[in-house]
Image: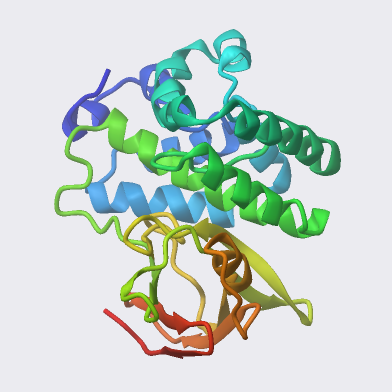
């Protein structure tokens, strides 16, 4: 059940806690959000939701939040543990109905391998993604180090939190900045059409190494509009966007000269950064887009 922004601000402490817990079950996140209620604006709510998650929550809080989700393709565990989020989870995973048995079995195996390696279930913002796309994403994330993957997973968790806040509060996105700080698209110039289902990883330089921040896959328009969740802004620094061009061309029965393309760019402020790639099997270009 959704409500107006004013109605949300006027909820009692108990009611507001339960409403926010429906969006994210981390007690720390909910409690910190409660400290700022009533919110002066919708924009403040979105920004606080992100700043609290990224600045005030620990890895234990992240893992607690993960328990509020079912494994991809399996909503039974969520029905038992968090019945209030059941319907939303079903909607978020609606694309699973389009999956083949082979894909579902591979995804189930990958989920088991993921949980065995990292100690928590695979978290991904599943809205609009097919089972094949989620399988491609999990296979990339399975390659991450244990200490790195938690931060990719927490990034996906907050994307889901924002989606649920939008469901909770009517018109929350009206006159509110819901954009991702970073977006990207890939265009196959050899065919003149968008590069669909190309895996892309955003990385930051931390502890003398490039570490993954977000993993996504391009849609039918060749775009990823939610590299980062609404309200999250990167700190000024250099970042890298890595495009898995090898897998893309293999899926089209082609051979390319570049197995991957990594574009390093500098973030200097909170304005929007669009990092596009124009690719063909033997060359590529990039520029700062809009």
Name the residue at 78% across, 36% down. Answer: 115
Query: Is 113 displayed left or right of 271 in the figure?
Result: right
- Percent x, y of residue 127: 41, 39
Instruction: Name the foreground residue: 118 vs 154.
Output: 118
Query: Is 278 displayed left or right of 64 in the figure?
Result: left
- Percent x, y of residue 84: 45, 14
Query: Compared to 200, does 29 lie above or below?
Result: above
Q: Quadrant of residue 187?
A: bottom left
Q: Look at the image and tell me in which quarter the N terminus lies.
A: top left
Name the residue at 61% across, 50% down. Answer: 136
- Percent x, y of residue 93: 46, 29
Q: Residue furthest front?
A: 253
Instruction: Name the foreground residue: 233 vs 38.
Output: 233
> Is residue 97 visible in this depiction of the protein?
yes
> Is residue 57 visible in this depiction of the protein?
no
Colour pattern of the rendering: rainbow
Q: Residue furthest right?
A: 116
Name the residue at 35% across, 56% down. Answer: 220
Q: Look at the image and tell me in which quarter the C terminus lies.
A: bottom left
Query: Is 240 displayed left or right of 14 in the figure?
Result: right
- Percent x, y of residue 170: 19, 33
Query: Compared to 280, does 211 lie above or below?
Result: above
Instruction: Name the foreground residue: 176 vs 222.
Output: 222
Name the residue at 42% across, 17% down. Answer: 14
Q: Quadrant of residue 141?
A: bottom right
Number of marks in the rendered image? 0
Instruction: Name the foreground residue: 187 vs 129.
Output: 187
């Amino acid at each position: 059940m959704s409500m107006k922004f004013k109605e949300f601000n006027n909820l009692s402490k108990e009611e507001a806690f339960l409403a926010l817990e429906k969006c994210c079950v981390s007690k720390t996140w909910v409690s910190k959000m409660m400290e700022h209620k009533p919110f002066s604006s919708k924009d403040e709510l979105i920004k606080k939701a992100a700043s609290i998650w990224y600045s005030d929550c620990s890895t234990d809080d992240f893992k607690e939040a993960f328990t509020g989700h079912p494994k991809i393709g399996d909503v039974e565990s969520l029905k038992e543990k968090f019945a209030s989020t059941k319907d939303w989870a079903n909607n978020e995973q609606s694309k699973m109905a389009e999956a083949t048995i082979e894909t579902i079995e591979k995804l189930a195996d990958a989920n088991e391998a993921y949980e065995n390696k990292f100690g928590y279930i695979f978290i991904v913002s599943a809205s609009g993604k097919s089972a094949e796309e989620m399988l491609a994403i999990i296979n990339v994330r399975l390659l991450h180090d244990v200490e790195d993957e938690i931060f990719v997973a927490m990034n996906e968790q907050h994307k889901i939190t924002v989606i649920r806040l939008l469901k909770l509060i009517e018109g929350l996105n009206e006159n509110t900045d819901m954009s991702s700080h970073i977006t990207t698209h890939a265009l196959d110039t050899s065919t003149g059409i968008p590069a669909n289902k190309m895996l892309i990883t955003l990385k930051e330089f931390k502890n003398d190494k490039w570490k993954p921040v977000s993993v996504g896959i391009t849609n039918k328009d060749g775009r990823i509009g939610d590299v980062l969740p609404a309200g999250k802004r990167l700190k000024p620094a250099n970042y890298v966007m890595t495009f898995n061009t090898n897998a893309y061309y293999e899926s089209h029965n082609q051979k390319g000269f570049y197995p991957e393309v990594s574009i390093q760019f500098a973030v200097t402020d909170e304005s929007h950064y669009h990092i596009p790639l124009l690719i063909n099997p033997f060359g590529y270009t990039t520029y700062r887009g809009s």
